Amino acid sequence: MTLTREDLKACLPYASEANLDRFLDPLNLTIERYEINTPARLACFLPQIAHESGCLKYVLEIATGEAYEGRVDLGNIQTGDGVRFKGRGLIQITGRNNYTTLSEEFAVRFTDHPEKLEEPLFAALSAGWFWKWRDLNLIADKPDDWVRERKGRKYNRFEWITLKINGGLNGLADRLKYYELAKQRFFKP
């Protein structure tokens, strides 16, 4: 499946015309490489990047990254790592560990040049890598009535994907708004 510019515009209606053009080819490469290539997978993937990137506007986290200083779970063990390895890309990849893994995955030294994750190609590919790494295609393929329980709360398929991306349900209402648009686009009667 290939995304058209019209698909992107329908799913990310607040994206600028320039960003639709800038990200179309990198997103098509991403969905092919990481097999995000069915209506169900796209309907789950695009709303997540819509929210995380502000409809392709932000490929660099707005916050300073200071909150990530000393976060051993992210691999931020050197002074300044939190700021240096704050969220970048369409899913806001965060932390020295992830930047190191992406450096190996794409043969680009993101640990030396973290700003390269802000380029459209790597911003999109890093989102696809994260999607695959978290096995989110498997969840996107689940039926609509699929439910997962965690700590006494039940999560539907889309909420579970959000949890695996964000660590919580931050921005769920916004993500769901884009999810409805994506479902309308890819599941036309």
Image: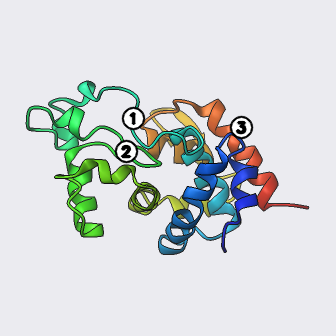
Q: Is residue 6 left or right of residue 175?
A: right
Q: In which quarter of the image is the N terminus?
A: bottom right
Q: Is mark 3 on a helix, strand or loop?
A: helix
Q: Which of 183 and 84 is in front in this view?
A: 84
Residue 13 versus residue 189 in the image, above or below: above
Q: In which quarter of the image is the C terminus?
A: bottom right
Q: Give whichever of discs 3 and 1 has the lower sequence position.
A: 1
**Residue tagged 1:** 61
Query: Residue 172 location in percent, x, y?
Result: 60, 33
Q: Is residue 82 left or right of residue 49?
A: left
Name which residue type carries label 1: Glu
Asked whether disc 1 touches disc 2, contact meaning CB atoms under 8 Å apart, the reply is yes
Label 3 to label 1, Cα distance in Å? Answer: 21 Å
Name which residue type carries label 3: Lys
Q: How crowded is mark 3: few (under 14 residues within 10 Å), some or many (20 or more)?
A: some
Which label was assigned to residue 133?
Answer: none
Label 1 to label 2, Cα distance in Å? Answer: 6 Å
**Residue tagged 2:** 88
Name which residue type carries label 2: Arg
Residue projecting furthest to the right: 189
Q: Give whichever of discs 1 and 2 has the lower sequence position.
A: 1
**Residue tagged 3:** 177
Colour scheme of this structure image?
Answer: rainbow
Q: Please tell me how many numbered marks the rendered image carries.
A: 3
Query: Residue 95 location in percent, x, y?
Result: 25, 43
Residue 129 seen = yes
Residue 90 versus residue 154 in the image, above or below: below
Q: Give whichever of discs 2 and 3 has the lower sequence position.
A: 2
